Image (spheres, helix red, strand yellow):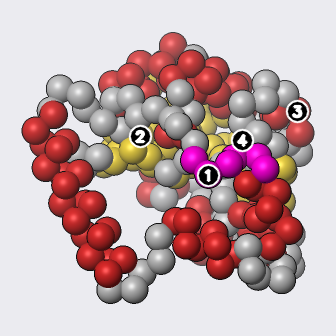
Amino acid sequence: MGEVEALVGTAPRVLDLACGTGSITARLLARFPESTSTGVDLDPALLAIAQGTFADDDRVGFVAAGLKDPGWPAKLPYDSYDAVLTATALHWLHREPLADLYGRVSGLVRDGGVFMNADHMIDETTPRINAAERALRHARMDQAKRDGALDWSESWQLAAKDPVLAEPTARRYEIYGEHADGDMPSVAWHARVLREKGFGEARPVWCSPSDTLLLAVR
């Protein structure tokens, strides 16, 4: 959030893109109490959790919309935002729809505003580093599961039995099915496309072999 403060101040109007349960919004409000947030997502179960979490907070609103729909920006309450933030969500999109999405995001960020995307971004020029990191990460995930942690599918099985989440969970499976295939292009691809779509600058501000926090300024 330091980059947000440095570039757009401590009371930003924020679009929480593919907001899920609203974890970015929660961090935003804890850091910047005078900020406001609009969360947009298509997943009915995650939106139900987010709406319940922020039900009494007039700084927060939510919009149900799919990011592949060209018309989703028209559903938002504002025409522009100081910052658009997203994390671990856009890798579900392939390159062409992701590039189209970046164009729409560019149209929503005010001049001087920021876009930040924390997600899986793989550098194809380092296959041995990538393979070693992936093997270690999956070994740790397997150990966590042996220690009793729930995996993705098991978590949704529990949600399907919850009296509040059962109905929206059933709807999310109608929308998404069991699995979504996406894309994880390199940081260089993301930065280049963001500049092509209207951002003046774009660069990573943190990275590991599998994940990057990318910052773009309009």
Nearer the camera: disc 4 or disc 2: 2
Which disc is residue 5 wearing?
A: none
Residues tagged 2 and 1 counted as in contact (Cβ below 8 A): no
Q: Residue at x 42, y 81 (%)?
A: 149
Q: Amino acid at mark 3?
A: Ala
- Check the picture and name the quadrant holding the C terminus: top right
**Where is mark 3, residue-wise?**
74
Q: Examine the structure image and report whether residue 198 is included in the region drawn in magenta.
A: no
Rendered image quadrant of residue 215: top left
Q: Amino acid at mark 4?
A: Tyr
Is residue 14 visible from the viewing direction of this image? no
Q: Which residues are magenta?
A: 174-179
Given residues 125 and 165, the one toward you in this image is 165
Q: Amino acid at mark 1?
A: Glu
Does dot 1 land on a helix, a strand or a loop? loop
Task: Say if 109 sits above or below 179 in the image.
Answer: above
Q: Residue at x 36, y 38 (%)?
A: 121
**Where is mark 2, residue-wise?**
214
Bin the neighbour count of mark 1 within 10 Å (Cα to Cα): few under 14, some 14-19, many 20 and up: few
**Where is mark 1, residue-wise?**
178
Q: Earlier in the sequence, mark 1 or mark 4?
A: 4
Measured from the top left, where is residue 190 in percent x and y? Answer: 43, 27
Q: Residue at x 69, y 26 (%)?
A: 104
| In this picture, residue 69 sits left or right of residue 98 | right
Residue farthest along the bottom direction in this orientation = 147
Nearer the camera: disc 1 or disc 4: 1
Is residue 136 visible from the viewing direction of this image? yes
Bin the neighbour count of mark 2 within 10 Å (Cα to Cα): few under 14, some 14-19, many 20 and up: many
Q: Earlier in the sequence, mark 2 or mark 1?
A: 1
